């Protein structure tokens, strides 16, 4: 049954890709089912739907590491993603300059 829940959640999210709640549910159900690939997919779509959500970028990074997907982990940790989340913060601009 957990696999069916994941499949249904992913289909629902794909019908309305801008709906972050659906992607979040798909991510959570995928994790509960032990499906890191599906969780990674849903989290990437969640980040695309809401690029200002830093918590989801961190989640993407951690899921990428857990799944052994270095490219996904790097995408989650990209400074550009964090910069998009806080575009006008002079203090963080200094930090980002060092990280870039």
Image (spheres, rainbow, N blue to C red):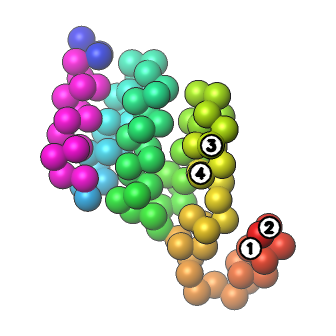
Reading the image, the residue beneath label 3 is: 71
Which mark is drawn over residue 99? 2
Coordinates of residue 41 in the picture (x, y in percent): 42, 38
Compared with 92, 27 (above or below) is above
Q: Earlier in the sequence, mark 3 or mark 1?
A: 3
Q: Are marks 2 and 1 in contact (CB under 8 Å)?
A: yes
Compared with 54, 97 (above or below) is below
Measured Cα–Cα span from mark 2 to mark 4: 14 Å
Magenta stretch in the rendered image:
4-17
Q: Secondary structure at mark 3?
A: helix
Check the image and name the residue furthest to the top.
1
Q: Quadrant of the C terminus?
A: bottom right
Measured Cα–Cα span from mark 1 to mark 4: 15 Å
Measured Cα–Cα span from mark 2 to mark 1: 5 Å
- Please give left or right for residue 72 compared with residue 14 in the image: right
Check the image and name the residue furthest to the front.
71
Reading the image, the residue beneath label 4 is: 76
Reading the image, the residue beneath label 1 is: 96
Q: Secondary structure at mark 2?
A: helix
Q: Which of the two residues, 20 or 48, is positioned nearer the viewer here?
A: 48
């Amino acid at each position: 049954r957990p696999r069916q829940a994941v499949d249904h959640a992913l289909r629902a999210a794909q019908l309305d890709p801008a709906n972050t709640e659906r992607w979040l549910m798909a991510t959570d159900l995928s994790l509960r089912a032990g499906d890191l690939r599906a969780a990674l997919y849903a989290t990437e779509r969640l980040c695309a739907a809401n690029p200002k959500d830093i918590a989801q970028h961190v989640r993407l990074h951690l899921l990428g590491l857990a799944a052994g997907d270095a490219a996904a982990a790097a995408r989650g940790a990209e400074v550009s993603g964090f910069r998009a989340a806080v575009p006008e913060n002079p203090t963080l601009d200094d930090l980002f300059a060092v990280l870039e």
